[in-house]
Image: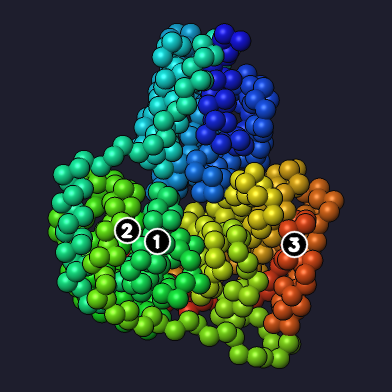
Amino acid sequence: MSEITLGRYLFERLHQVSVDTIFGLPGDFNLTLLDKVYEVAGMRWAGNANELNAAYAADGYARIKGMSCLITTFGVGELSALNGIAGSYAEHVGVLHVVGTPSTTSQAKGLLLHHTLGNGDFTVFHRMSSNISETTAMLTDITAAPAEIDRCIRTTYIAQRPVYLGIPANFFDLKVPANLLNTPIDLSLHENEPEAEKEALGMVLELVKKSKNPIIVVDACASRHDVKAETNKLIELTQFPTFVTPMGKGAINEQHPRYGGVYVGTLSRPEVKEAVESADLILSIGALLSDFNTGSFSYSYDTKSVVEFHSDYVRIKKATFPGVQMKFLLDKLNYIIPNYVQSYKPRPVPTRVPDNAPIGPSTSLKQAWLWNQLSKFLKEGDIVIVETGTSGFGINETTFPKNVTCISQVLWGSIGFATGCTLGATMAAEELDPKRRVILFTGDGSLQLTVQEISTMIRWNLKPYLFVLNNKGYTIEKLIHGPTAAYNEIQHWEHLKLLETFGAKDYENYRVSTTGAWNEMTGDKKFNENSKIRMIEVMLPVMDAPESLIKQGELTAQINSKH
């Protein structure tokens, strides 16, 4: 074939970069485009329940596979997705947001079309999205359209931020040269400027050489910008004690003997806080220093010798090197650093949190016991997704096996995110390795915001574990303000009827309220195989919460009252 439609060109390009599931909803301005999904072998249309859930699902898929694609219709569809897109922007997640817009003729005439504001302005929604996009494109010239699509895909992947791509409805069937597909999209990073990189590397090595008590702190962007391998190699080469932030969970091997735990400022375990804050050199990799990620900005380093490695710059003490990317700098650092750490005498790392002490099987479940015990259920390769709330804080008390991926929306913190995200992450995991387990922990309140996406999981015969923490309401909100307020209460749901309601045929339901019931369930060999979708309702006391969340609630309440 010498020519293909522009719609097919888009999906062929996405397929080439391993984006094989497309999220979103149909609308009359994108229907012709959606026809083209089925023309590309290996491509599927997820068919979400609503646009917000679709954006959450695209976020989850991208965190596992590197980028994703969301398709909505003009106005009503795209605006419904924007909360999810904003979260992806805040948290460095690459989502290509494709919007089917009215035809170029309709726009030129300023017609009073449905899904518009009735004022003839067809650019207003594009302008809204531009504030939460790395770049945008509105196609107006079919000859330039393929190059613009390629640019948008590259930017989404490289920047790990959302990109907005508006395509008029009359463009989808227009033809473009098929041989353009023969040239792969360049997804490589541009090399660092040599002199700046050399100067930055020299400064880092000089600090390492002088240091007696260096540590490594790993944060979210180590995962988002694909430097996990370089980071784990740095730990191995230096043997420096290494810590993660809440957003950095899963970025390193927590079974490594030099892993010291989770650092969250004043919310850290005392021995972790002491080890981090007494260091004389901190190598910080991929930091995102938000309030919930830092214990309300309570980092308190003794040293000013801090090196921050970021995706597009490096900061060494007070010196900043714009454009020096950590991907290349860490690679070169790993090559040279063994010569600079030969005299380093490894400091002890904080001891691991001990296993739960034996207790009677009839003991009621509590958060502190649950998150510690979870370490025994997880296995290598698992994908764990936790919601803003008790699970997002509780997971910090869990020690992961090797190669566990953890997804938590600590910065954006949109309640309900995790359920939609689970759909996307499960579809991505299925494409990479069907044996990988995807495990959701969400609250009974959070679930009510996005529960419809369980229907899409069932539609595709996906097999995640859905743990619903039933503590009768929005516990995280109660801990911040209004512990008995009506606005923090929710309608009780029959959670164990949800899978059947959404049409599941092969599923399992569990309700656990004691330690014995938990151990019996998680100790069952068949339960440990992701052979079917499972709903597990975990019954917990109303105000029971991880200790770090209780403290965070107090800090947040104090900050809110002062400002």
Question: Tag on residue 233?
Answer: 1
* Disc 2/disc 3 C-alpha distance (Å): 38 Å
Q: Residues within 10 Å of mark 3 (few under 14, many from 20)?
A: few
Marks 1 and 3, how far apart in space? 31 Å
- Could you tell me which quadrant the C terminus lies in? bottom left
Q: Earlier in the sequence, mark 2 or mark 1?
A: 1
Q: CA distance from mark 2 to mark 1?
A: 7 Å
Q: Which mark is residue 529?
A: 3
- Counting from the top left corner in percent of width and height, residue 290 is at 35, 60
Whether residues under marks 2 and 1 lie with C-beta atoms below 8 angstroms apart, the answer is: yes
Q: Quadrant of residue 207?
A: bottom left
Q: Is residue 239 above or below residue 319?
A: below
Q: Kindly tell me whether residue 202 is visible in this rendering.
A: yes
| Badge 1: residue crowd in 10 Å (few <14, some 14–19, many ≥20) | some
> Which residue is drawn at the image coordinates 51% and 65% (left, top)?
392
Please state if 548 lies on the left or on the right of 203 as rendered. right
Residue at (54% x, 30% y) in the render: 16
Residue 334: mark in rendering = 2
